[in-house]
Amino acid sequence: MTIYRVTARLKADTAGNLRRKLDDGSIAAQQPDGQEMVDAFGRATVTKSGDVRWSETCYCPTPLAHERATVLDRFFEDLTTEPIETYQPYEGRPFLEYLGDIVATSSNRRA
């Protein structure tokens, strides 16, 4: 088991789909790592420059291999990982709040 600091950029055009998958429980239900991804997104923050940062536990020999194949690479780009000792808090706006605002803004534009 390794804990990683993850830095990535949200693909803005996928925000609505990510929010739906978080809300309907499909990410949380994914085995073996779904709930950890949901928890990690809950810890994530967004910097002023738009980077999303979070800490996440992974049991794969390749950092976040399963998570990237099933979720992360669909919704994020420029993803980097760095091993760390323990979960870390990051400065910035809570990611789930940011995600909700993107989805709301997008919905308002379509209305």
Image (cartoon, grey):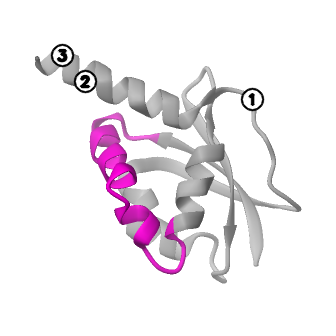
Residue on which the image places disc 1: 91
The foreground one among 46 and 8 is 46
Mark 1 surroundings: few (<14), some (14-19) or many (≥20) residues within 10 A? few
Q: Identity of the amino acid at label 2?
A: Ser
Mark 2 surroundings: few (<14), some (14-19) or many (≥20) residues within 10 A? some
Q: Residue at x 35, y 56 (%)?
A: 74
Give the overall secondary structure of the magenta segment: helix
Which image quadrant for residue 19?
top left
Q: Are marks 2 and 3 in contact (CB under 8 Å)?
A: yes
Mark 3 vs mark 1: which is more N-terminal?
A: 1
The foreground one among 76 and 108 is 108
Residue on which the image places disc 2: 106
Residue on which the image places disc 3: 109
Q: Which numbered circle lies on residue 65?
A: none
In the rendered image, residue 46, in percent from the top left (x then y), is placed at 59, 31
- Taking the view exactly as shown, the residue that stands out farthest to the left is 111
Q: Find the magenta span and give its range.
A: 10-34
Quadrant showing the N terminus: bottom right
Horizontally, is 101 left or right of 7 in the view? left
